[in-house]
Image (cartoon, helix red, strand yellow):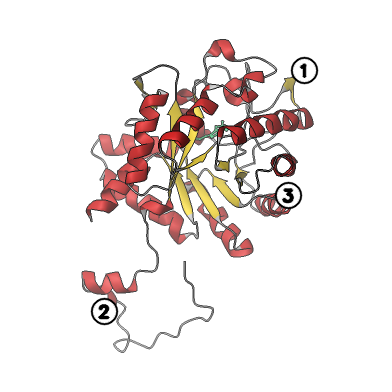
Amino acid sequence: MSRSPHATTVAPFPLTRLRRTRASAALRDLVRENSLEASDLIWPVFVVEGTSVEQDIPSMPGVTRKSIDKLVEAAREAADLGIPAICIFPYTDPARKTETCEEAWNPDNLSNRAIRAVKAAVPEIAVMTDIALDPYNANGHDGIVRNGEILNDETVEALVKMALAQAEAGADILGPSDMMDGRIGAIRRAIEAEGHRNLAIMSYTAKYASAFYGPFRDAVGASGALKGDKKTYQMDPANTDEAMRLVERDLAEGADMIMVKPGMPYLDICQRVKDTFGVPTFAYQVSGEYAMIMAASENGWVDGDRVMEESLMAFKRAGCNGILTYFAPRMARLLGQS
Ligand code: PBG
């Protein structure tokens, strides 16, 4: 992102014709202000038990839940396409979901086995995790629930155990997505104490209580389980200043990278975070955004490739360093062709 600190003076027509620099592809290439590359992309992937399994997710056409062997193949492909990171989300067997969520810090849970397998086979790709209790919680919430209340401090203790198990499994980037208070500091202190000096934290800092997560909850099998909504911990879509306070807080607690989520409806937040703090800033183009673009393009109502590219360029224009997107391999392939 480049922005002149001074307002530019535009000479009157015809001295200035702004169409001159749009008149040919060569000139357009020269004056282009932002670029989109495979190295800007993080690919969220869903993992499921079994071997040679690839299950379609009806609300996310083109996205599948993959068994670990298939996930490893996909990670190889992603690395070869120049995608620097994948982010692993597990589909947990409902029988393993409890009110106390202990499967979340089982060193051999599906997610931790997937991290180990990917790091063993494709060491150059960075593996990002999700830290939140919802895949393991009988009631679908990101935190421990008692008497209808989502408990903050007890949840943070559980998240620390979860983070340490992921660190042991070989994760490169921890992604706390739970929105409890104090979790970044608690996780940072715990991983430092265990000697994980270079383990990065990308905090889901400004995560909104959004209806755009619907298809994701189908993908991880949380839709049926969730009782109520997440409004006591995820942000109110009406707020901006609160996002700035969260960013300041997470940076002070030891976050390396900041995420805004969802993406397209919150580009103003991305831009304000980047302009205010100048820190590595990421957006998550979430499942509902993906589903909308896919549905429209499958109906022939929009050009899928072009809308995909334009939607991702918007994040770069807003100042994001990168984007988590289900389009990652498709976008990387398209960029490879041009
Ligand atoms: C869960 C989590 C969610 C997403 C990522 N991590 C869903 C939620 O908060 O309910 C959503 C991602 C997407 O919609 O693509 N902690």
- Residue 187's x, y, as percent? 70, 40
- CB of residue at label 1: within 8 Å of ligand 1? no
Nearer the N terminus, badge 1 or badge 3?
Answer: 1
Label 3 crowding class (10 Å Cα cut-off): few <14, some 14-19, many 20+?
some
Q: Which mark is residue 20?
A: 2
Closer-to-camera residue (189/30): 189
Q: Indicate the secondary structure of the residue bearing disc 1.
A: loop
Residue type at mark 2: give it: Arg
Identify residue for label 1: 147
- Residue 74's x, y, as percent? 35, 34
**Spatial CA span between label 2 and label 1:** 66 Å
Does residue 222 appear to the left or right of 83 in the view shown?
right
**Spatial CA span between label 1 and label 3:** 30 Å
Identify residue for label 3: 253
- Quick check: marks 2 and 1 in contact, CB under 8 Å? no
Rendered view: 173 above or below 6: above
Q: Residue at x 69, y 43 (%)?
A: 195
Q: Nearer the viewer, mark 2 or mark 3?
A: 3
Q: Indicate the secondary structure of the residue bearing disc 3.
A: helix
Residue type at mark 3: give it: Glu
Q: Residue at x 59, y 59 (%)?
A: 279
- Quick check: marks 1 and 3 in contact, CB under 8 Å? no
Rendered view: 106 above or below 186: above
Residue type at mark 1: give it: Asn
Q: Indicate the secondary structure of the residue bearing disc 2.
A: helix
- Residue 191's x, y, as percent? 69, 41
